[in-house]
Image (tube, grey):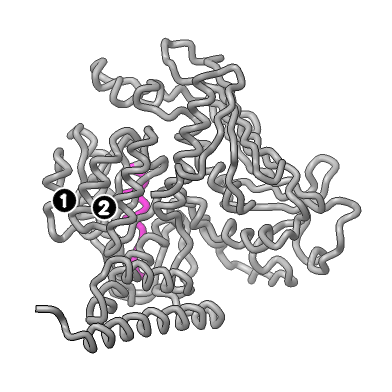
Amino acid sequence: MQPDENQQTQNEFNRREFIQNAASFGAMMAMMGGVPLFAEETNAPAGGETHYRASATPMNFAVIGCGTQGREIIQTLSRITSPPNDPPVVPLAPVVAICDTYEAAFRRVKEAAPNAETFTDYHKLLEKKEVEAVVVATPSHLHREIVEAALAAGKHVYCEAPLATSFDDTRAIAKAAKAAVRVHFQSGLQMRSDPQRIFLVPFIHSRQTGMNVMARTLWHKKQSWRRAAPTPEREAALSWRVNSATSPGLMGEQVIHQLDMVNWLLNIRPVAVSGWGANLVWKDGRDVADTVQAMFEMPDGSNYFADASIGTSFDSAYEILHGSDSTVLLRSDDEGSRAWLFKEVDSPLLGWEVYPPKVQFYKETGITLMAGASKTPPKQKAGEAPLAVKTPLQFAFEAFITNCGTVGKEVKNFLGSKVSDDPDDLREYLGTVKQTHAWKGAAGWQEGLEATVLALKANEAIIKGGGTKIQIEKAWFEV
């Protein structure tokens, strides 16, 4: 029996009206400042603990992969609680399940996740209905199957960067995340959630630094990437980063974060990449370079140079964006994320430069770039404790928890409206929600796809050697 034609027309009108009203609401919320799911944080005590207001709904987490990164993630989640000055204090990200194929790893996270059920098979973990969100922190080459299974099980998913170590696996994860419209997916490109970097986006996008001249990033940290273990099999599992069959190299494991930052801040995507690399320090039979350089060619004619090494620690890590009027330097360290502006002598005066604190770098004076720095800074009260420094990982999980809650609520609202059950309509509606300030800045599947593909192609150029140039195709970023 065919539906009544008038009823079809009315349903289609209601559907479009609902989505259009949502879009108008989204635009209005953006202009008014919106109402975030979590209100402003209280002063965090020393140690970096993160706190939300108690009105936030707790979300049960599972972490798959309890290695170094997995342990840091579990520690971070354990500190996300309601404020201690608003009892009862409750955990907002309780880890109720953990999974690893190496059972000894469970002992190392017991203190941070004392009540977590342990699994050696992630399929069994995903069957647990109480698990709402899954963090995939396994070695990168194992991501695909786990992410696809978690999404199919209806879990919100946070996947560490890179998404995968192969082109096909990366696109498969992006495709699965795009299709799973009823849950939230976040890529572990942590800097996308850092308020300091979010603050810089409109500043740079509005050409306050002039025309783009070039960009440079550097990541230097002396470490072998090889881990000792009781057996050769366990050592190979722990040292997967030194094997080209399981590792995307320095470009995929480290530079990917800076590469994503440059693309985001400059708002352009590279059109070609060349690379060079060698084992200069760790001559232990590995086939992954310990020192690499890549040059990304931008569509505006400028270049982005990426430099990374685990053979030296000198100069640590930074990103530099050179503009015709000024240059921006960004650093992340134990003091948090910081940025400075270095103006050219012939650049226009913007008016606010007299207020922020200045820092001397060799012969240059850097103007501090930070939210509120264009105003006269308030004086700190005597005896007032300084705010604890948050890590990019903490900001990333704040965004993840917020956005998972928003998606869950809005999906329920949309389906409850009985206007449409078409996934494309729901995707369109959620797109309007993401334009409001209820949505926290974070990297989704599209950002994860783009950064991972670019990092993998840079690594491919490095492996081929000789300054091999790889042309970047737009079709690679479409799923």
Span of residues in magenta? 70-84
Compared across the picture, whether 219 is left or right of 211 comes to left
Q: Could you tell me which residue is drawn at 31 percent across and 85 percent down? A: 14
Compared across the picture, whether 257 is left or right of 351 comes to left
- Which residue occupies the foreground of this view, 393 or 216? 216
Tag 1, which secondary structure? helix
Q: Which mark is residue 277?
A: none
- Which residue occupies the foreground of this view, 228 or 433? 433
| Badge 2: residue crowd in 10 Å (few <14, some 14–19, many ≥20) | many
User: Does the stretch in magenta take in 71?
Assistant: yes
Above-or-below relation of 171 to 35 = above
Q: Could you tell me which residue is drawn at 36 percent across and 81 percent down? A: 16
User: Mark 2 belongs to which amino acid?
Assistant: Val
User: Mark 1 belongs to which amino acid?
Assistant: Leu
Q: Which mark is residue 134?
A: 2
Q: Could you tell me which residue is drawn at 41 percent across and 61 percent down? A: 398
Q: Main secondary structure of the magenta part?
A: helix
The residue singled out by tag 1 in the image is: 126
Q: Position of residue 463 (x, y in %)?
A: 49, 20
Q: Could you tell me which residue is drawn at 51 percent across and 51 percent down? A: 191
Quarter of the image containing the N terminus?
bottom left
Q: Are marks 1 and 2 in contact (CB under 8 Å)?
A: yes
Q: Residue furthest left?
A: 1
- The quarter holding residue 400 reads bottom left
